[in-house]
Amino acid sequence: MSNRLFQGIIHQMRDTIDRTIGVIDESSVIIACSDLGKIGEVNEEVTAEALASSDVFQTGDFTFKSFGSRPHPEYAVFVGGADPEARKYVKLLAVSLNSIKQYYDEKYDRGNFIKNVILDNILPGDIYLKSHELHFDSDVSRVCMLIKITDKNDISAYEVLQNLFPDKNKDFIININESDIALVKEIKPNIDMKDIDKLANSIVDTLSGEFYTHCMVGIGTVVASIKDLARSFKEAQVALEVGKVFDTETTIVSYNNLGIARLIYQLPTTLCDMFLKEVFKRGSIDSLDHETLFTIQRFFENNLNVSETSRKLFVHRNTLVYRLEKIKKITGLDLREFEDAIVFKVALMVKKYLSNNPVKF
Amino acid sequence: MASVTLKNVYKIYSGGVTAVTDFNLEIADKEFIILVGPSGCGKSTTLRMIAGLEEISKGELHIGDTLANDVAPKDRDIAMVFQSYALYPHMSVFDNMAFGLKLRKTPKDEIKRRVEAAAKSLDIAHLLDRKPKALSGGQRQRVALGRAIVRNPKVFLLDEPLSNLDAKLRAQMRTEIAKLHKKLGTTFIYVTHDQTEAMTMGDRIVVMKDGFIQQVDTPQNLYDKPVNEFVAGFMGSPQMNFIDAKLGKAGEGYTLTFGKCTIPVPAGKAAGADLAPYVGKDVVFGIRPEDVHDEADFIEKAGGAHVTCAVEVTELMGAETYLYLKCEGSDVTARVEPTSTAKSGDKCQIAFDLEKIHIFDKETEVTILN
């Protein structure tokens, strides 16, 4: 990757410096040069000792200067000629190439580092060491979002997101797999969750509005330390999973707002089975047809208000009362009673959870 | 350019929630139609179904002459502008508008031509080199519109695009969008929950509630002849006054009684409605705030149709004054002349413009008399 980076710079400088210029690596191979024919050639006159020196040195018709970030410089830049002007050019080039390389390494490594942190691929003890090494501010507020692309098209969502969050020092876009992209975003401390939701909304709206790409966004909690990023990422994953089961029509699910769904999601399936058997001991929930379930849903949405529900369903009040009586006969639960209604509501959610084939435990 | 037709369209989510029920609408080519209604009424879902971002559970969607149910969103020849638009912060206005086309591998000279044309129609040609940071809210909104325009779509879908703007800017952008529609001559489908936006921008308005279309009509007709209590209350600000009343008969004519007050229903108005089945029954009497008067000469002309009310609050708006009144146990809002002398705590006389009254069925909320 460095080779391309160096060649790009050399190519840009070629016209300004009217001499042959290039970069040689620690195995004496020319990896970038203004004279393209020389790329790949080995210059045996440049020895490892010469490369290790921090001073300008001369070999043949060229002036060299080493650069690189490791304890021993990994590269040397060369300029044709042995005159004072060549020395000047070589020093200038070494400074700029070194800075570019440092910037590149830092950027590249930071992304990888964050990926390792959120995927738990790094030992907790190493997190602080590595973040210090990368000049990474480890104690700022960040939030993890997981963007799941639910329908593919020929536009790269990754590229779009990178352009939406271009600050490579604060925001990290990480490809998790074919359909999932993680966003680790630095945020102001004490940020309102509404602002984070807005951010998620702008991602969904941009992807769907501009590129017709449908996606779901799971939002983890805000964390103040880099070591907690993995937790925020897992929360974003859980939010998406729970949202898929209980909140099928929403595109943005925040871990903070999962409510009772989170409780149910964490219950052992055996316990859920027991609960359903207990609630519906007089008759199975499966014996309720689609229309009855729809009636129940509307009844809950209208706060157990018979008149309001019947109006919304365009049925006579007595029809609704008859349906509710029928439900009572089948299940033993009178949905007009708050206690029974809440048991039924939870049972419906548990049923939904079980019908999504969760891992049995 | 294209017409859009929705026939018996339903959206039913996997959990059984029905977001849109039996939606039927024909949108003419180049029409500016507004979908309006409270949150959760299914207007955005309908728009997303037209866009192809939501699957249609039942029914047919035609764009032009094509059945579009199974056409991929990118092939529907539509462009969308959403509420939470985001501009690419490090790109210039030109690049922001060109980005989508670049990703679609559109030739460079074509991109340049389209971006420049769109910028010209939006009056942002002089801003093409600027970064989003250096733009005002309204200019950013125009760039977001520009990103949609460069695609030269047959249909524009706009989902509450002005919600994030402040009131002043929103009013300004309303006019800009209406002008843009005229300039582009394309079909616009616009979703909003703001009845003022709906009234001022569209050729026709679709009022929705709980996933059902309540009424489709021109802004003026919706305002003057609402089909039910919901539409009557939703359109207009301050909203229509609703007073529980009883319909009675006096000789050949009809009367409305609320509290100790009885007002006649004008014979000419009653002639156009079938009021007989409602005699003796509870109904809802509706009157718009601007049809409630406190001017002495109007009260004098009104004869028996005046009521004594207690003034609870007055709000001077500059060009008009709102009086919040307690009238025979009901709350009534009146929009009167700024010269009105009514003060909080006063008793005052008001009269209703009887030619403008509405009567609704108390049970079904359907309009009996407009």
Image (spheres, helix red, strand yellow):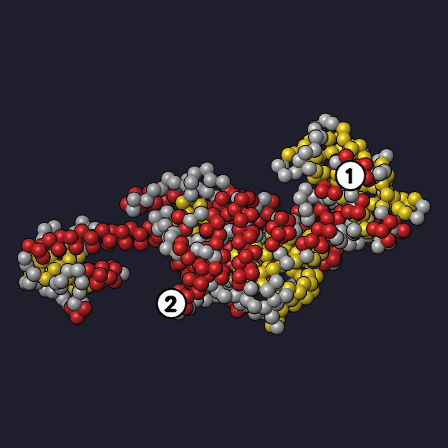
Helix, strand or loop for disc 2: helix
The mark found on residue B108 in the picture is: 2
Which of the two labelled residues, at mark 1 and mark 2, occupies the earlier sequence position?
2
The mark found on residue B298 in the picture is: 1
Q: Residue at x 88, y 46 (%)?
A: B254
Which is in the foreground here, disc 1 or disc 2?
1
Q: Is residue B239 left or right of residue A128?
A: right
Badge 2: residue crowd in 10 Å (few <14, some 14–19, many ≥20): few
Residue A157 place in picture, x, y as percent = 44, 60
Q: Residue at x 37, y 47 (%)?
A: A170
Helix, strand or loop for disc 1: helix
Q: Chain of mark 1?
A: B
Residue B168 place in picture, x, y as percent = 53, 44
Residue B221 figure quarter: bottom right
Q: Amino acid at mark 1?
A: Phe
Residue B156 figure quarter: bottom right
